[in-house]
Image (spheres, helix red, strand yellow):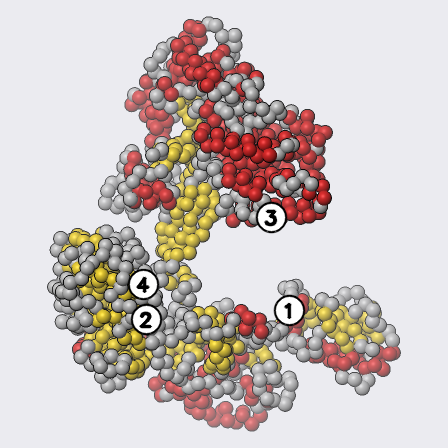
Amino acid sequence: MSTLHKNCLAQPGRKKVQISFVIRDEEERRHRAGVNSLQLDSKQGILYSAGRDGIIRQWDVRDNVEATYLRSLEHHTDWVNDIVLCCGGNYLISASSDTTVKLWGLRKENTCLSTLRTHKDYVRALAYARDKEVVASAGLDKTIFMWDVNMLTTLTTTNNTVTTASLPGSKNSIYSLAMNNSGTVLISGSTEKVLRVWDTRTSDCMMKLIGHTDNVKALVVNRDGTQCLSGSSDGTIKLWSLGQQQCIQTLRIHKEGVWALAATENFSHVVSGGRDKKIYMTDLKNPNRVQLICNETAPVVKMVTTPDMSAIWVATSESSINCWKLRKSDETADFEDVPTVPYNQEPFRTLKGAAAIRKYHVLNDKRTILTQDTEKNVAVYDVLKASKLQDLGEVDFDEEIKKRHRIIFIPNWFSVDLKTGMLTIHLGQDENDCFAAWVSAKEAGINVTDDNLRVNYGNRMLRSLLENWLNRIQTDHGSSDGSQSTEVNAQTKLDSQCCRIPKHTPLMISEVGGRCLYRMLVSQAGDENDVSILNETIPAWVMNVIVEKSIPKALKISFYLVPLSNTCIRPVKNGTLRPSRDRLVANDFIQVQKIAEYIHEKLSENDGSGPYNKTSDCISNHLQGNTPEKNFELSCNDQILSPTMDLRTLKHFIWKSSADLTIYFKAKH
Amino acid sequence: MTVLSSAETAEQPPRKKLCLSASRQLQSKSYALSQLNPMASPLDQPVIRHIKQQQQLQQQQQQQQQINCSCDNESNGSPGVATLCNLGNTCFLNSVLYTLRFAPSFLHNLHHLITELQEITGRSTNGLKGKCSSLGRSTSSVSSKMWNFQSSLNVSMNDLKIIQVTERLHQVFEALHNCELKDSSDPYQPEVFLQSLRDVNPIFEGNQQHDAHELLVCLLDNIREGCKLVMQHSAQVNCFVAPAPVIQPVAPNKLKKFSGQVRKSLKIASSSKTRPVNGILPPSVNIASDKVVLPENDNFADDKQMYVVNGTTNAVQSDENESIPNGSSSSSTSMFDDFQGVSLLRTTCLECEFVTERKESFCDICVPINGLTNGDISPENEFNPYDYDSVNKLYHSAIVTEEYLQDTDKYWCEQCCRYNEAKRSVGYESLPRLLTLHLKRFCTNYRAVVSKVNEHMPTPLTLECFCEECLSLNSQQKTRAHSYQLYAIIMHLGATIASGHYVAYVKAQDNLDEYINCPRDRRKTGSLSVTPNGTLPANYKKSSISNGLFRFLKISSKTSSSGAPNSQSSDSIDSGKVSSIGRWCRSLECCGVRILDNSEGGDSVWLECDDETVRTMSVAQLTQILESKSSKNSALTPYLLFYVKVNHSE
């Protein structure tokens, strides 16, 4: 892909940069969450749909053919909010909540040609002037930008500067835009509850149309730019005359907010849909003539009509896209006051969607995630492998969590995001230290002979994600690494290992809570172009660990080790009995048997300088010929501890306090 | 009083600038001086004139036995209203006390709350009952009583102190009542009350100036605690009484547990701030809760209804003693509900438009002052502070607010599983009968220094209701269900919160109606037959009436120069009331204010209560004070506004 504003990549500002990836199938043929926008290329018979899963899909919707999935356009990392087809269906422009606007080539490559990063917040709406090939984009950053499509298509990696006219002055987040075909008039709807009409030639706001009492979410303007229709969250549809600068008709059909509008070419009829899930068609010349087209199953977000106005494609906040037949406008029918019987009972065509993940639970091993989707199906995911392990079907989610509960404590090292309806894992967000989780190799499921070997989940994950890139840069300055490789010990070998994760996994580098800096697939990380960008964008906290190989610090836990009073061991210091307790500090993953070994070792020291005084010889006899964990019994809060339990689990599940841990021990007899 | 409409008087009212604790002697001296001095500020004139009129009037009448009102009284311009002494920087206290005293039906409710609290304490310590009625003035007797109380009801010591404050508050009003009876001009010193207040809330210790709002919140808090206690107690009593009497002695453990549960549920109910009592309670308590639901109704018809309910419950219960709190729980809860409303915080995700609502109860509404400069309301139209609609719009926009969560402060929408923009709006599900508006005059700036906002904020005498119901009615072009009438203002003079002076302006209102046939006024006899108490209390008979506030009220009515005919006519009205309804609540003779109806006079009369000085003024005078915008730093600025709800009858 070409990068437009490279300096943006090099200077991510002061914001912390995170690395994220999505756990998904290689090919996601169905929308996972709601669909925010639709475009129909009627000549080719292709429907374009913009999903909340960040994917734009193409569907074959030719007449007399079973509607099928064609392909996906993937590069957005957040909801795609709006799309427009331009240049006769050769290009597509998309606006997304990842704050970018992207240009896609559709004829040959079906890829993202350029990314426009001028918006500073979610880009919410697009408008297109066919005659001039101009696209306007606007969003929650309150600004509108005008783009010359023909110019955008000529951009290359080297020629990547673009001039844009901005229309400043709006004080509120913009939720809707409309432009007439000749591009003379641009109208924006925002939380200001006012329509602003702009003159695109002078970039001036020509007028404000006041009348709505809530956010304006849908706008349509007629061909010559003299009339416009607006749908608002206040539940009304208003027809405005731009010449008279006033509202000439108010339709109160919907019970809730109006989110989508489609009008006939001559503005004789308007089709409207919204939060109340109903789609109505209204005769604008006789507003009492209202017909209920259909009842959708979810709030209606967007509609496109076929050119002959015989059918309408409807996108909702659910993943399926339905096509409903429209009644011919000249058809006479009986109109009720409040139409309740819909014209269509069933959709005429449907593009099935898939379920979106709505709930998740990270299990105690901090590696397995249980999810539940909109169809109540439960699934098990493994973060380290970046893949789904198992589908459990329709089982009780909470019950399944209980069933899989284990008494083990591992610090959080990632966070989970469900906004796209798929599992997105973020590494390096502020609240979670990516390198906090040190786990024994055994626990991590790696076959090693040495029990002492540890794995850092974060380190391992990042290595797996960036494997291709690491291989590439290591071969670049491979000589020095090669000489050292002979003397690496088992631990560093383990550290530099990685697990196989699916090559199609999308990898995102973005500012925490903000814009995406770069997106690629794990398999692409070694490509020529991507390597250089990665070199610039990979944050320092990742570099230090996976390139410089500085070993992430383990968390420490301090604790007191106290002999039980009924044993013959007394704490001593410098040969004398002392009342105070022994305060020790250890890595949080140290196991109880290690502490037993420590006690054993100290008691075996016979020079009297050890911390304990053996008042009876029986102990020394006892010590001989036994393994440490069999010699001593450790307890905490009156619970006898399993030798394999680690300190942080002990602190979390048995001690249950933030104060320093106290562990008691006694000799076994 | 007509003199005041002249242009000259539109200036500032005569005020002691930054005088915090001028001693009484000094003050009277200054007043004496002002009388002598022909150059006294023009606003002093009405006072003098008023006094002169009063003197004339008294000469004319020449028949009162208590006519020998002291000269002090005259020179102070006191209209016969008992006054409070400044104990050294206690004008914050006095202004609140004056306000509460004249708050519609506050005294009456307080009286019954105190009676109930005393009954709870009295019952638990049988031997000390006698002492309770005398409202132990010495701290020792009170505390010993309290200790016993504690042991029996398991109330914390802090609760007892809180109750004590409320009792002492009542004592202050009782003492003021007695002052008025005796026509004593000596200002009352609320020392005992102040002391117990300091016991509960140490921030009032020391002789510093304090925030009147803080005190008001504290007092209302104490009253709420008292109400809660009475409720708990009545719930407990009901638990014991409601089941058949056989059970009563059997399983004390069980009952104890149960009552504990009830208490818990009560607490939950009050903390969740929905209805005071929830459905877990036994049916007999639910009766009480049903009554609780009607707190706003202070009109006579509803009182009667409540009375009927009480009557039936009384009939069921044989033991008179047990029935007491049952009947009275409604009054004490309504006492606090008078001040408590429910606000509604709505958050709407702009993407899915899913609304989450949170309800919170409140006692006062904070009104930011910068509303004037904020051009959101009508940037095109010039703001007119004298226009009723624009003033109401200003308050409306300052109180019912709407903001957007955007940019870096986006809202986590549970429906969308992401951060989206959201609209957050504050509305009011219900507004209390007595609405308190707290103008945000004091703000902390970046150096953590509290500074005062002196900008003028218009004070509407009538405020349109802005509860959800009224707003929806208004949007349908219908008339609103209620409106709010100003009944008191506490003004602040000075530059900071720690210095300065407070003055209360209260509306002199006739609250006698609510005392008639009061359902909560129980007699030991428990019968409805006419008793000596059933008539207007002795000290409210004609002679004393014409001696009390009535005197000045007559003057204020411009029509008559001599008060005699008026006095007779209103006396006859009163006797008419007495004969037709026949029963006055006993609390009237305990702590009531002696103001009689001035309806024939047209305009209502306001009292300017400035520590030891209480003066009368007309509405016109008051509005002049409220509208004066001059000299920003020394001006009296409205600080707390008190409104009473008026239901528009359809």
State which chain disc 2 sits on: A
- Label 1 crowd (10 A; few <14 / some 14-19 / many >=20): few
Q: Nearer the viewer, residue A564 or B518?
A: B518
**In front: B324, or B423?**
B324
Label 2: state its secondary structure.
Answer: strand
Q: Are marks 2 and 1 on the same chain?
A: yes
Of tags 2 and 1, the one toward the viewer is 2
Q: Is residue A295 above or below residue B187?
A: below
- Report the Cα–Cα distance between label 3 and label 2: 49 Å
Location of residue B534 with respect to B225 vertically, above or below = above
Packing grade of label 2 (10 A; few <14, some 14-19, many >=20) is: many
Q: Residues within 10 Å of mark 3 (few under 14, many from 20)?
A: few
Mark 1 or 4, closer to the camera: 4
Q: Which residue is mark 1?
A: A653
- Residue assigned mark 3: B264
Residues at discs 3 and 2 in contact (Cβ within 8 Å): no
Spatial CA distance of label 4 from label 3 is 44 Å
Q: CA distance from mark 4 to mark 2?
A: 14 Å
Q: Residues at marks 1 and 3, common chain?
A: no
Seen in the image, is B604 located left or right of residue A658?
Answer: left
Q: Quadrant of the N terminus of chain B?
A: top left
Q: Chain of mark 3?
A: B
Find numbered disc 3 in the image and state the secondary structure of the residue it sits on: helix
In this orientation, does residue A54 appear? no
Cα gap from disc 1 to disc 3, whole angstroms = 31 Å
The label number, if any, that marks residue A277 in the structure image:
4
